[in-house]
Amino acid sequence: MAQQVLPIVGDWYQTVDGNTFEVVAYDPEDESIDIQYFDGALEELDLDTWLEMDIEAAEPPEDWSGSLDMMTEDYGVDLDRPASHDHNNPLDELDGL
């Protein structure tokens, strides 16, 4: 018999076969639960299905970018170019006032 774990938005859970997912939405009125697996796949469950699942609470994955499906180019930073130190500090303008 599955242990009854209530869905909490933002919490991570793990199935017995090792799949981790996050609850991204829960509507108690229509008893629907939206989950997102680490790879980005979305699934909608009804509360009865949720209660029948054999799941347990889990820690969020260390690599939070898994579900974002992003490449390093998507971060907007050229990793091959050295960092520039030509930053303007907005607090420097306060010194002149």
Image (spheres, rainbow, N blue to C red):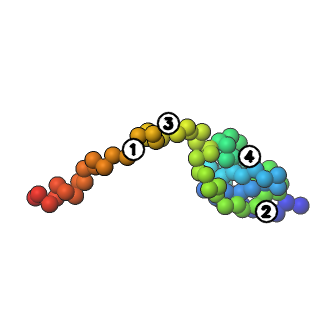
The residue located at (23%, 54%) in the rendering is: 90
* Viewer can see residue 39: yes
Q: Secondary structure at mark 4?
A: strand
Residue drawn where x is 14% and y is 60% of the image: 95
> Of the residues tagged 2 and 3, which is closer to the observer?
3
Dot 4, how many residues are within 10 Å of its Cα: few (below 14), some (14-19), or many (20+)?
A: some
Q: Are marks 4 and 1 in contact (CB under 8 Å)?
A: no
Q: Amino acid at mark 3?
A: Glu
Q: Earlier in the sequence, mark 2 or mark 4?
A: 2
- Mark closer to the chain start, 4 or 1: 4
Expressed as whole percent of the image width and height from the top left, the position of residue 7 reads 69, 57
- Does residue 34 appear in this view? no
Residue named by callout 4: 45
User: Crowding near pointer 2: few (<14 within 10 Å), some, many (20+)?
Assistant: few
Tell me the residue that label 3 is attached to. 73
Report the amino acid beneath label 4.
Answer: Leu
**First along the sequence among labels 4 and 3:** 4
Q: CA distance from mark 4 to mark 3?
A: 34 Å
Residue nearest the viewer, comparing 73 with 70: 73
Give SS at disc 2: loop
44 or 80: which is nearer to us? 80
